[in-house]
């Protein structure tokens, strides 16, 4: 077990004890302690046997931009993870990297027809963040804004708000 994976297990234990530490604060504290070892350590944690460690590593890598931009290829590999929550977490966090995650688009295409509405919305918003030229997918986002599932409608609306803010700058 690496020092970084032990740190992640400690964070997971805190969360399980309901002593939550926000991810942006956790990343800063880990960076202060680990320095240049943090990003390589988090990338290594993406292959950990523990799915919770893999999910937390994904979240912390997305908090670490731009230092963690080098992690995108390893994060894309998690799209085929055995654990469903790790896969969906990978999609969510890859969206934060925008066009740097362009290589994920072909792997996300099949997700557009998934039976789960949230998975479809997550895939379409991530594809659009990774490849903003895919405007043919915008109707799927607009349709998701009226979903009865608050997670789906919120995800879609957040994307549209981001897009709108980006065009006003």
Image: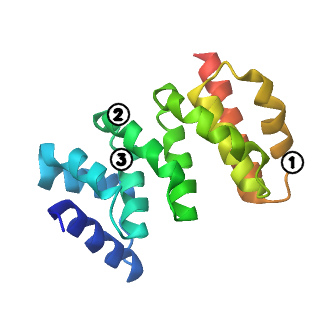
Q: Is residue 162 visible?
A: no
Residue occupying image coordinates x 73% and y 48%: 120
Q: Residues within 10 Å of mark 3 (few under 14, many from 20)?
A: many
Front one among 164 and 37: 37
Front one among 122 and 152: 122
Relative placement, left or right, of 120 versus 139 is: left
Q: Residues within 10 Å of mark 1 (few under 14, many from 20)?
A: some
Residue occupying image coordinates x 74% and y 53%: 152
Going from the N terminus, do you reach mark 3 or mark 2 first?
3
Figure check: 75 above or below 49:
above
Q: Which residue is mark 3?
A: 61
Going from the N terminus, do you reach mark 3 or mark 1 first?
3
> How far is mark 1 from mark 2, CA to CA?
33 Å
Quadrant of the rendered structure where residue 17 is? bottom left
> How far is mark 3 from mark 2, CA to CA?
8 Å
Q: Position of residue 11 (x, y in %)?
A: 31, 70
Mark 1 vs mark 2: give the one in front: 2
Going from the N terminus, do you reach mark 1 or mark 2 first?
2
Secondary structure found at label 3: helix
Task: Please say if the residues under marks 3 and 2 sit with CB atoms less than 8 Å apart.
Answer: no
Q: Is residue 47 visible?
A: yes
> How far is mark 3 from mark 1, CA to CA?
31 Å
Q: Position of residue 118 (x, y in %)?
A: 72, 55
Q: Position of residue 33 (x, y in %)?
A: 13, 55
The label on residue 69 is: 2
Q: Which residue is mark 1?
A: 146
Relative placement, left or right, of 117 versus 131 is: right
């Amino acid at each position: 077990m690496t020092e970084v994976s032990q740190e992640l297990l400690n964070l997971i234990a805190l969360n399980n004890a309901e002593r939550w530490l926000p991810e942006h604060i956790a990343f800063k504290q880990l960076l202060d302690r680990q320095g240049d070892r943090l990003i390589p350590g988090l990338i290594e944690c993406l292959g950990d046997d523990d799915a919770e460690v893999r999910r937390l590593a994904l979240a912390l890598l997305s908090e670490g931009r731009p230092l963690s931009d080098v992690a995108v290829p390893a994060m894309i590999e998690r799209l085929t993870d055995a654990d469903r929550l790790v896969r969906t977490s990978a999609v969510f966090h890859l969206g934060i990297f925008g066009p740097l995650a362009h290589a994920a688009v072909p792997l996300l295409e099949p997700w557009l027809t998934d039976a789960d509405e949230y998975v479809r919305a997550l895939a379409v918003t991530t594809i659009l963040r990774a490849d903003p030229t895919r405007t043919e997918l915008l109707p799927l986002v607009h349709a998701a804004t009226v979903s009865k599932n608050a997670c789906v409608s919120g995800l879609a609306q957040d994307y549209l708000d981001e897009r709108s803010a980006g065009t006003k700058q």
